[in-house]
Amino acid sequence: MNGYIHSIESCGTVDGPGLRYIIFTQGCLLRCQFCHNPDTWEIGKGREVTVSEIIKDLKTYLPFIKASKGGITVSGGEPLLQLDFLLALFKECKKLGIHTTIDTSGGCYSNDPSFQEKLAKVLQYTDLLLLDIKQINSKKHIKLTGKPNEHILEFAKYLSDRKIPVWIRHVLVPGITDNKEDLQNLRAFIDTLENVEKVEILPYHKLGVYKWQTLGLKYPLEHVEPPTEDVVQMATSILID
């Protein structure tokens, strides 16, 4: 089974527990204004790899990964766009006793029977999902990502109904995702879920701006600076405390 990936990070530390072997897949349906990997957007591009190639490389890091109680994280782009690849990869990971995580925006979630069938199979081999809820207000979500969020919230409920462990992530962008009422509404939504192990606030940064420039794209948040510590604390008090 082949997949299309953007890149691999061999020892990541922020996308799941322990040290993580992180695969950034190619292709995404969202167009987030703060995206730090716009070079992963286009579907069908990237580097074509086989599951066997990845497992061979992954095995060289296993002593470090297992010692740290880490595992593999498939991020993006949007990994759920390549469910066949995910299934084949995670099956092989489980043969080696590797913890498996999907880092997703849920942006391609649908009720299409084929998607549902494949997703259910993938989740049988998935230990954790990192679900990025970018904006609880759907109109603001459209402005921020180009898409509404109703199907993403439906995906969150789907995972909750099946008791699949989830870490909720929220990128904190001053003036865009730090409105108190929106944060309170997001917290209220999270509180309806029965599977949330952790909530993470990811302060907005501008580390990916050079990629927009390299691609000849105008970065839409040029005027936005990272949040202050006070703003991060305010969001923490609403979403986590």
Image: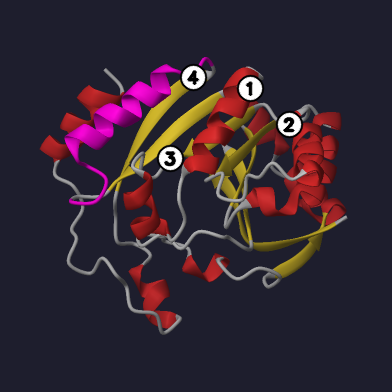
Badge 1 is on which residue? Answer: 164
Provide the secondary structure element on which disc 4 rests: loop
| Badge 2 amino acid | Leu
Badge 3 is on which residue? Answer: 133
The boundaries of the magenta stretch are: 175-194
| Mark earlier in primary sequence (3, 2) | 2
Alpha-carbon span between mark 3 and mark 2: 19 Å
**Magenta run includes residue 143:** no
Badge 2 is on which residue? Answer: 123
Identify which residue, 50 or 76, lies in the foreground: 76
Alpha-carbon span between mark 2 and mark 1: 8 Å
- Res 120 → quadrant: top right
Q: Are marks 2 and 1 in contact (CB under 8 Å)?
A: yes
| Residue 77 percent across, percent down from the top left | 57, 58
Our reading of the magenta stretch's main secondary structure is helix
| Mark earlier in primary sequence (4, 1) | 1
| Badge 3 amino acid | Ile
Badge 4 is on which residue? Answer: 193
Identify which residue, 58 or 177, lies in the foreground: 177
| Residue 85 percent across, percent down from the top left | 80, 51
Alpha-carbon span between mark 3 and mark 4: 13 Å
Identify which residue, 203 or 95, lies in the foreground: 203
Looking at the image, residue 188 lies above or below residue 227: above
How crowded pointer 3 is (Cα within 10 Å; few <14, some 14-19, many 20+) is rated as: many
Image quarter where the C terminus lies is top left
| Residue 41 percent across, percent down from the top left | 55, 67
Q: Residue at x 41, y 60 (%)?
A: 35
